[in-house]
Image (cartoon, grey):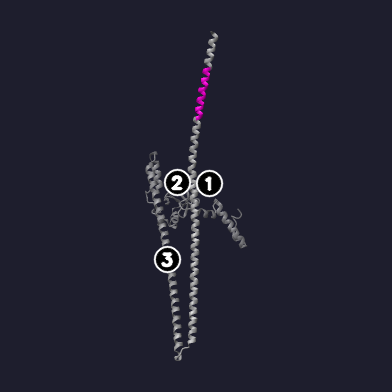
């Protein structure tokens, strides 16, 4: 209580005043158990999602529509006073200054703070992006009011009409979502096409630069060769004679330079060929390893399939054996009962005969 009512202008130390200001802001935000951090976490919800939020000593249903948060209105007093209210704007929750929306996210025209609601509606840019107007026309009821009227009419409910309107709104929402997804897909395709064109243009530019560089090197070599030939001619024709030794030395130098260059190019070609051969060999080895892995996997699958096929066969064989054993046991029981009955009959017969003999 002391920090919340403290006058920061009376504090001499600016650092202390700054810290007290932070604590006061936190206490002010936590008055209804909602801080700035909690609000930012709620804003990270996906568009169209719902969540249960415990704050202000009760549970509320939070819904995110586009860029703003809504609370499902459950206060029966507000619902009785403002028919058609479904949502309350979370950012504008305040005693006596709340903004109420209908089920289709349009403004409820008979709410107390209609001017504030219209200003908030315009600030969000909804008046330009939605098909409904800010101020509802006279005699026009919202979808929620029509649904309630259809349900409560004559104590019954025109469920078919209500479900038809609900299906219509749901189909409209699904159509809008499908159009947005299609537009997003087209934008992604256009971006991919633009990126591919940029890559192709960059590759063409690099190729053109390489061709220009190669052409310039060829022209420079050709110019150097021509200068060397002109120098040779000038050396031959100087004073009507030619310094043959100097000419031959230059020729040998150029020949050696040419041979050295050819040898370097041959070495470079040989290295490239070796690298290509090594790359092909590595690719073949990787392909062989991959094929072996595929064959092992196929063999494992075949073994599993065979095992799976054997298991039912063994189970069926066990069932047959069990049935045979059961039949044999039944047969033995029947035979034993017949045999016992026969023995009892024989004993009874002999006993009767003995009794007759004794009587005689």
Over which residues does the magenta segment extend?
Answer: 328-346
- The location of residue 107, given as percent across then percent down, is 42, 52
- The location of residue 97, given as percent across then percent down, is 48, 52
Please state which of residues 18 and 168 is positioned toward the viewer in this rendering. Answer: 168
Asked whether residue 166 is drawn in magenta, I would say no
| C-alpha gap between disc 3 and disc 1 | 60 Å
* Above-or-below relation of 249 to 187: below
Q: Which residue is mark 1?
A: 58
Local SS, label 2: helix
Local SS, label 3: helix
Q: Nearer the observer, disc 3 or disc 2?
A: 3
| C-alpha gap between disc 3 and disc 2 | 65 Å
At 49% from the left and 76% from the top, the residue drawn is 261
Disc nearer the start of the sequence (3/1): 1
The label on residue 81 is 2
- The location of residue 157, given as percent across then percent down, is 39, 40
Please state which of residues 237 and 357 is positioned toward the viewer in this rendering. Answer: 357
Q: From the viewer's perspective, tell me whether residue 5 is left or right of residue 97.
A: right
Please state which of residues 307 and 41 is positioned toward the viewer in this rendering. Answer: 307
Callout 1: 10 Å neighbours few (<14), some, many (20+)?
few
Q: Is residue 297 visible?
A: yes
| C-alpha gap between disc 2 and disc 1 | 22 Å
Callout 3: 10 Å neighbours few (<14), some, many (20+)?
few
At 57% from the left and 55% from the top, the residue drawn is 26
Task: Single out the residue that lies furthest toward the top.
Answer: 360
Asked whether residue 335 is drawn in magenta, I would say yes
Q: Which residue is mark 3?
A: 200
**Dominant SS type (magenta):** helix
- The location of residue 217, given as percent across then percent down, is 45, 76
Q: Nearer the observer, disc 3 or disc 1?
A: 3
């Amino acid at each position: 209580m002391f920090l919340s009512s403290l006058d920061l202008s009376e504090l001499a130390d600016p650092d202390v005043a700054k810290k007290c200001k932070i604590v006061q802001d936190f206490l002010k935000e936590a008055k209804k158990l909602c801080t700035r951090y909690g609000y930012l976490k709620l804003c990270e919800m996906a568009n169209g999602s719902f969540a249960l939020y415990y704050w202000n000593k009760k549970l509320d249903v939070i819904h995110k529509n586009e860029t703003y948060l809504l609370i499902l209105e459950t206060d029966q007093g507000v619902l009785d006073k403002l028919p058609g209210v479904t949502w309350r704007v979370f950012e504008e929750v305040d005693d006596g200054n709340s903004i109420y929306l209908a089920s289709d996210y349009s403004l409820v025209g008979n709410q107390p703070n209609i001017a504030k609601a219209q200003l908030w509606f315009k600030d969000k840019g909804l008046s330009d992006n939605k098909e409904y107007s800010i101020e509802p026309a006279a005699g026009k009821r919202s979808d929620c009011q029509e649904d309630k009227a259809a349900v409560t009419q004559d104590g019954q409910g025109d469920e078919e009409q209500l479900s038809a309107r609900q299906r219509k709104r749901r189909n409209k929402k699904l159509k809008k979502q499908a159009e947005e997804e299609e537009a997003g897909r087209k934008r992604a395709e256009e971006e991919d096409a633009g990126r591919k064109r940029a890559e192709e243009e960059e590759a063409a530019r690099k190729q053109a630069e390489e061709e220009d560089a190669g052409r310039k090197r060829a022209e420079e070599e050709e110019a150097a060769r021509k200068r060397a030939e002109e120098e040779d001619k000038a050396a031959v024709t100087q004073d009507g004679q030619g310094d043959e030794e100097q000419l031959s030395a230059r020729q040998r130098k150029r020949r050696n330079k040419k041979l050295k260059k050819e040898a370097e190019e041959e070495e470079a070609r040989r290295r490239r060929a070796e690298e290509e051969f090594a790359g092909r060999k590595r690719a073949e080895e990787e392909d062989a390893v991959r094929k072996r892995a595929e064959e092992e996997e196929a063999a494992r699958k075949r073994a599993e399939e065979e095992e799976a096929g054997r298991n039912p066969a063994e189970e069926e064989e066990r069932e047959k054996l069990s049935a045979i054993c059961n039949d044999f046991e039944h047969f033995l029981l029947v035979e034993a009962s017949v045999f016992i009955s026969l023995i009892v009959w024989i004993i009874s017969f002999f006993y009767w005969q003995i009794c007759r003999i004794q009587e005689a």
